[in-house]
């Protein structure tokens, strides 16, 4: 099986040598009631989690680190990203690094991604795209709504997915990078999240609700004392290209450095590649 990394715009796109037979994503979810953000026994955390995206918008900006894990057999592949995000404008910039080929002999240029309402822009996309051009993808046209395609889940889309929280359990306090946080585990429904999402994210989440193998998304989220997301791990499941079996993907988003200045400028129309993109070429 050729495990070379390649990207596909307009489809379920980051494919990293995945083979038939991957299991469905694990749930690991608890019951519907739990302790709330204050730690009071019996409080229901669902309303708190549904407000998490609004809390980020009030916070305005942060730094973000992302990772996306795909596994098959004994092989695990991780794609990592790092950047900044403006939640008020729903604009972000990430530098995404693809892993080495299995032999460890091939390096890939980092891909710069700009995240915007309804669109994903990629530079160093490879596959015949000129080095000075951007590729623009309509996120609503992607069967995963860009929760998986870019190799990093849009941080605000990840938070908006929590608007569809159905069940959640409070698992207690812990520490994350020196900050005390509260850990919640639950399940969100993509269709419900899409109905409650902001105007910029509604169409993409609706596409994901139709495109994934199941509309249910298990998650673990860690909130600080202000209700801000510090860490969010979500597990997605979609049917692979062969149509036989599902692909399990775990996406983790870390948010920190709240209030960081963020200046994201979208590409000019003349800087966007208008040619045909080769779908099966590896990105080098």
Image: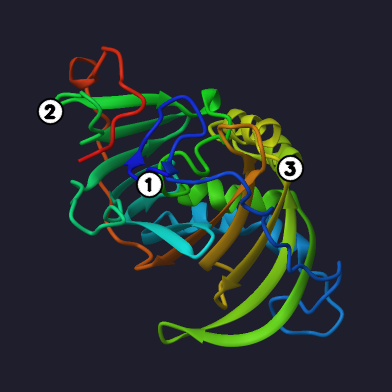
Label 3: element kind = loop
Label located before the other in sequence (2 or 1)? 1
Quarter of the image holding residue 211? Answer: top right
For the residues labelled 1 and 3, the Cα–Cα distance comes to 28 Å
Find out whether the residues at labels 3 and 2 contact each other: C-beta distance under 8 Å: no
Viewer-side residue, 73 vs 248? 73
Q: Residue at x 23, y 32 (%)?
A: 126
Name the residue carrying label 2. Answer: 132
Quadrant where the N terminus sits is top left
Label 1: element kind = loop
Judge the density around disc 1: few (<14), some (14-19), many (≥20) Cα neighbours within 10 Å. some
Judge the density around disc 2: few (<14), some (14-19), many (≥20) Cα neighbours within 10 Å. few
Q: How is the image coloured?
A: rainbow
Judge the density around disc 3: few (<14), some (14-19), many (≥20) Cα neighbours within 10 Å. many
For the residues labelled 3 and 2, the Cα–Cα distance comes to 37 Å
The disc label shown at residue 3, or none = 1
Label 2: element kind = loop
Name the residue carrying label 3. Answer: 215
Q: Residue at x 73, y 53 (%)?
A: 188
Q: What percent of the width, then of the height, locates residue 182?
A: 62, 79
Q: What percent of the width, then of the height, locates residue 130?
A: 15, 24
Quarter of the image holding residue 90? Answer: top left
Q: Is residue 188 left or right of residue 86?
A: right
């Amino acid at each position: 099986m050729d495990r070379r990394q390649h990207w596909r715009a307009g489809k379920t796109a980051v494919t990293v040598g995945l083979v038939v037979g991957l299991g469905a994503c694990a749930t690991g979810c608890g019951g519907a009631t739990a302790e709330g953000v204050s730690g009071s026994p019996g409080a229901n955390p669902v309303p708190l989690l549904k407000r998490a995206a609004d809390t980020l918008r009030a916070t305005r900006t942060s730094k973000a680190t992302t990772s996306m894990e795909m596994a098959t057999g004994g092989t695990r592949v991780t794609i990592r990203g790092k950047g900044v995000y403006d939640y008020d404008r729903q604009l972000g910039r990430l530098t995404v690094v693809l892993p080495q080929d299995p032999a460890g002999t091939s390096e890939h240029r980092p891909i710069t991604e700009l995240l915007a309402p309804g669109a994903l822009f990629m530079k160093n996309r490879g596959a015949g795209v000129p080095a000075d051009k951007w590729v623009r993808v309509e996120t609503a046209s992607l069967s995963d709504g860009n929760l998986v395609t870019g190799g990093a889940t849009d941080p605000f889309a990840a938070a908006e997915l929590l608007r569809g929280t159905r069940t959640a359990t409070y698992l207690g306090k812990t520490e994350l990078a020196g900050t005390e946080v509260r850990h919640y585990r639950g399940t969100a429904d993509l269709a419900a999240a899409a109905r409650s999402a902001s105007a910029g994210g509604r169409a993409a989440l609706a596409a994901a609700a139709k495109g994934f193998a199941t509309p249910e998304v298990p998650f673990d989220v860690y909130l600080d004392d202000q209700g801000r997301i510090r860490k969010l791990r979500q597990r997605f499941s979609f049917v692979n290209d062969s149509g036989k079996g599902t692909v399990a993907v775990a996406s983790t988003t870390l948010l920190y450095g709240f209030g960081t200045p963020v200046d994201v400028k979208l590409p000019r129309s003349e800087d966007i590649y208008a040619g045909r993109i080769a779908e099966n070429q590896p990105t080098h």
